[in-house]
Amino acid sequence: MNYALLQPEEWPQAKFILDSFGQNFQQYGAALIAACKDGKRIVGLHCLHPVLHGEPVWIEESYRGRVNFLRMRDVLTSSLKAGTEYYVFAPDRKISLMAGAAGMKRLDWEIWKGIA
């Protein structure tokens, strides 16, 4: 078994695997793909790629209730290519309610943090 980073020109070798997860890393210049190969055959992948996440949200206390966070979100998302995914990490109920008000879908995922 050989473990190594795939170079971007090698990524097409992993396309069918990435497609099965709904991933298209061609759009991410900063992505990394580690592969385990048995000969020339990919038998394992582990990926790191940039993911857009929408925080922090901050509104000066005296302006709360007057600043529309949805309009700020619209300013951000209007510059994204249609279909671009983004995430919000909600540390409390207030942020969860804001994400729901923005039409975001709650996922049943745990969040884990790693530091290199």
Image: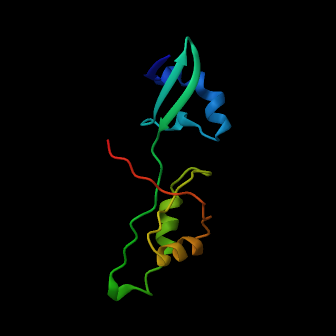
Taking 83 as reference, is 9 left or right?
left
Using the image, determine if residue 52 lies above or below residue 32. Answer: below
Q: Position of residue 94 (x, y in %)?
A: 48, 78
Question: How many tags in the picture?
Answer: 0
Residue 42 sits in quarter: top right
Q: Position of residue 72 (x, y in %)?
A: 46, 70
Q: Position of residue 27 (x, y in %)?
A: 52, 37
User: Which residue, as the protein is rendered here, is positioned at the far front?
Assistant: 1
Taking 17 as reference, is 70 left or right?
left
Q: How is the image coloured?
A: rainbow
Please tell me which residue is depicted at 60% across the width and 65% down the height of the picture.
106
The residue closer to the viewer here, 21 or 1, is 1
Q: Position of residue 15 (x, y in %)?
A: 62, 28
Task: Point out the image quarter for the C terminus.
Answer: top left
Please tell me which residue is depicted at 50% across the width and 20% down the height of the picture.
9
Please tell me which residue is depicted at 44% across the width and 35% down the height of the picture.
29
Using the image, determine if residue 31 lies above or below residue 103. Answer: above
Please tell me which residue is depicted at 60% across the width and 60% down the height of the picture.
108
